[in-house]
Image (cartoon, rainbow, N blue to C red):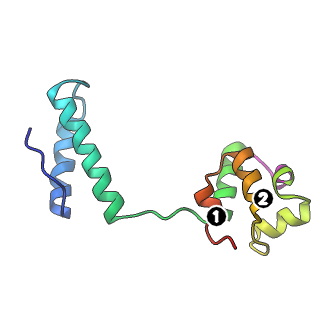
Amino acid sequence: MDIKPIRSDDDLAQALARVEQLWNAPMGSPEGDELEILTLLIEKYEDARFPIPPSNPIEAIKFRMEQQGLTARDLEAFIGPSGRVSEVLNGKRPLSLRMIKRLHDGLRIPYESLLQGAV
């Protein structure tokens, strides 16, 4: 096992090629350990090189609605009356801290996503 830090896209390509070779290695074997270490190094490099910012709060809410088959009416428990839900979903009203807490607690939407652009 000859593992080194990933510092460039070329290093990344080599690490990915090696991961492909090791893909079915049994956990706990030397090859499985190498695979685990390489995936951690790849993840660290990609997180630093290609960061993905948290999603827009409205997109996060709509994504969760789609996942759970919810309608705008279902959001009333978290946001308030239907008019307010409509304003929030159309970007005409910002989320309040109370709405953010309710959406997080009730729909398990991460705070990081809900707080993007909050006042």
Residue drawn at (87%, 65%) of the image: 84
Expressed as whole percent of the image width and height from the top left, the position of residue 27 reads 26, 25
Residue position marked by numbered label 2 in the rendering: 99
The image shows residue 22, relative to residue 29, as above or below, that is: below
- Is residue 91 inside the magenta stretch? no
Which amino acid lies under the numbered mark 1 shown in the image of this protein?
Leu
**Quadrant of the image for the N terminus?**
top left
Residue drawn at (77%, 47%) of the image: 70
Tag 2: Cα neighbours inside 10 Å, few (<14), some, or many (≥20)? some
Point out the residue furthest to the left here.
Answer: 2
Tag 1: Cα neighbours inside 10 Å, few (<14), some, or many (≥20)? some
Q: In which quarter of the image is residue 52?
A: bottom left
Magenta stretch, main secondary structure, is helix
Q: Judge from the rendering whether residue 46 lies leftward or rightward of residue 13; answer left or right.
A: right
Q: In which quarter of the image is residue 38?
A: top left
Residue position marked by numbered label 1 in the rendering: 115
Spatial CA distance of label 2 from label 1 is 11 Å
Residue drawn at (32%, 58%) of the image: 46
State the extent of the magenta-drawn residues as a range: 70-75
The image shows residue 22, relative to residue 81, as above or below, that is: above
The first of marks 2 and 1 along the sequence is: 2
